[in-house]
């Protein structure tokens, strides 16, 4: 017998089905509620609302668990390459050797952008944030591939669009870096691996240790179920706009400081604390003070009420990367001190605020030589396959256009008053 719940509104009762997930998590299906009762539900910020059924990523925020297609993130980060994870997100299974080779080749075959994309980038204002530059380029791509305006119906076009995005996101990110620095653009070299090619286009060389560290960072960012940017990719994509535009929208969502933009804010915060004498406690007090808008960036998460498992993996890498580069970064000690102080503080404990993925990632990006305002672009590079997989699943499931309801609380009907009479 399928479980149902009954809700009573006035004298009437309504039975609603319960949807059970793979790990027995339960959701009340309210999709027929308005038709049955005239009522809608209200849940600003979707804190209690599932927007879809998905088979891509599972998170248990209370226990600090993250899995893609059933594989724990720790195991994937330890053993896989980024492109294996991309394959896993798209195809529901890890690739075998031949499948991976074919997948990697398809990405290489689609690598390279028309020269005009550089003109587009060159024409943008110097002060535009790199995430804005990336969005402009993403939205320009259909101009070079008009058939992508319908990115779904024809399977060959669908995959061409997907491969074009995957292959060229690193190209665009590297171009942005070189433009900011006033350096000549470096063409992609498809004899190199995915991450190696990115580092080479960015810095003109690619150290093997850095390739490995960056590959792991990209894995850790690959998908995170229905977060703000992934939901945006699904929501905007549900209008059947082309994939480039849906990904451009997701990219803009990621730009925000409460989402992907947090990694930039973390480093700026750590720098500010360092310049202010390195007193972690002073900033803990500021974060707790409700009259102060300051928040401890890189702390807290909508879903994790435990240590973010990605932060745990990244933290291990911080020392490894700095050691292998023979670098010392004074903000590392500040970050560790801040984390310790926050974890021992009642305010953070009560609210279950732990370090999230962004708390330590910026330190690694900085060690790799990536400028602070490019951090969110790096996040986008990692998250791209997740956005595509979420969009793909939404289209495969034939989900309807996203169109929430509201509770209107404004003025009720009133008569128009002529301009001169008001
Ligand atoms: N510093 C201080 N207090 C915090 C913080 C923080 N970083 N995060 C949450 N709180 C407090 C809130 O003030 C609130 O306190 P109250 O109950 O006394 O009012 C309580 O904890 C709950 O916080 P909410 O904002 O309601 O939690 P929500 O789930 O809406 O927000 C968010 C999650 C946006 C991530 C929040 O924790 C935050 O702003 N963190 C800093 C920004 C950040 O690191 N973002 C990256 C998120 S991860 C990612 O996108 C990849």
Image (cartoon, grey):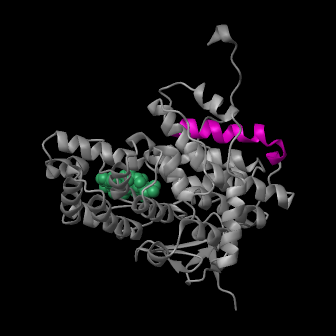
Q: Does the magenta stretch include residue 22?
A: no
Residue 369 location (% of width, % of height): 37, 46
Query: Which quadrant of the structure image shows residue 192?
Result: bottom right
365 relative position to 28: left or right: left
Look at 30% across and 61% down and name the residue there.
324
Q: Does the magenta stretch include residue 131?
A: yes
Residue 194 location (% of width, % of height): 57, 58
Look at the picture and state if 386 lies above or below 61.
above
Quadrant of image for the N terminus: bottom right
Residue 303 location (% of width, % of height): 45, 65
Query: Which quadrant of the structure image shows residue 223?
Result: bottom right
Q: Which residue of the protein is positioned furthest toward the bottom in this rendering? A: 1
Look at 66% across and 58% down and name the residue there.
388
What kind of secondary structure does the magenta stretch mostly adopt?
Answer: helix
Look at the picture and state if 113 lies above or below 417.
below
Quadrant of image for the C terminus: top right
Tell me, yes or no, if residue 10 can be seen here: no
Q: Which residue of the protein is positioned furthest toward the front in this rendering? A: 191
Q: Total number of numbered labels?
A: 0
Look at 35% across and 55% down and name the residue there.
364
Of residues 84 and 212, which is closer to you in this image?
212
Of residues 94 and 208, which is closer to you in this image?
208
Q: What stretch is highlighted in magenta?
A: 130-149
Tell me, yes or no, if residue 155 can be seen here: yes
Ligand 1, what quadrant?
bottom left
Look at 65% across and 62% down and name the residue there.
390
């Amino acid at each position: 017998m399928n479980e149902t719940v009954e809700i009573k509104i006035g004298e009437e009762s309504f039975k609603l089905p319960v949807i059970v997930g793979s790990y027995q998590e339960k959701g009340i299906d309210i999709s027929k509620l308005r038709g049955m009762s005239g009522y809608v539900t209200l849940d600003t910020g979707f804190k209690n609302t599932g927007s879809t059924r998905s088979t891509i990523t599972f998170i248990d925020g209370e226990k600090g668990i993250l899995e893609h297609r059933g594989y724990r993130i720790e195991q994937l980060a330890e053993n896989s390459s980024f492109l294996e994870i991309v394959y896993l997100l798209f195809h529901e299974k890890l690739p075998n050797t031949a499948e991976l080779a074919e997948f990697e080749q398809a990405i290489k075959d689609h690598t390279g952008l028309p020269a005009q994309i550089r003109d587009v980038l060159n024409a943008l204002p110097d002060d535009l944030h790199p995430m804005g530059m990336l969005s402009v380029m993403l939205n320009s791509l259909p101009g070079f591939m008009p058939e992508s305006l319908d990115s779904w119906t024809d399977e060959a076009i669908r995959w061409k669009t997907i491969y074009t995005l995957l292959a060229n996101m690193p190209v665009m990110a590297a171009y942005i870096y070189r433009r900011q620095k006033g350096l000549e653009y470096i063409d992609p070299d498809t004899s190199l691996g995915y991450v190696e090619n990115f580092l080479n286009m960015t810095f003109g060389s690619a150290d093997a240790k850095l390739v490995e560290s960056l590959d792991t960072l990209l894995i850790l960012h690959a998908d995170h179920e229905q977060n703000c940017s992934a939901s945006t990719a699904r929501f905007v994509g549900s209008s059947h706009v082309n994939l480039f535009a849906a990904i451009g929208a997701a990219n803009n969502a990621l730009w925000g400081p409460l989402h992907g933009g947090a990694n930039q804010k973390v480093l700026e915060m750590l720098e500010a604390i360092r310049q202010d004498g390195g007193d972690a406690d002073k900033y803990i007090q500021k974060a707790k003070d409700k009259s102060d808008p300051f928040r401890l960036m890189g702390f807290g998460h909508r879903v994790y009420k435990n240590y973010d498992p990605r932060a745990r993996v990244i933290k291990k890498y911080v020392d490894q990367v700095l050691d292998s580069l023979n670098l010392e970064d004074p903000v590392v000690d500040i970050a560790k001190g801040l984390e310790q102080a926050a974890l021992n503080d009642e305010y953070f404990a009560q609210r279950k605020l732990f370090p999230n993925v962004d708390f330590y990632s910026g330190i690694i990006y900085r060690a790799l030589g990536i400028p602070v305002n490019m951090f969110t672009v790096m996040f986008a590079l990692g998250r791209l396959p997740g956005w595509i997989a979420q969009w793909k699943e939404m289209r495969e499931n034939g989900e309807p256009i996203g169109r929430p309801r509201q509770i209107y609380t404004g003025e009720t009907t009133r008569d128009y008053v002529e301009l001169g009479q008001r």
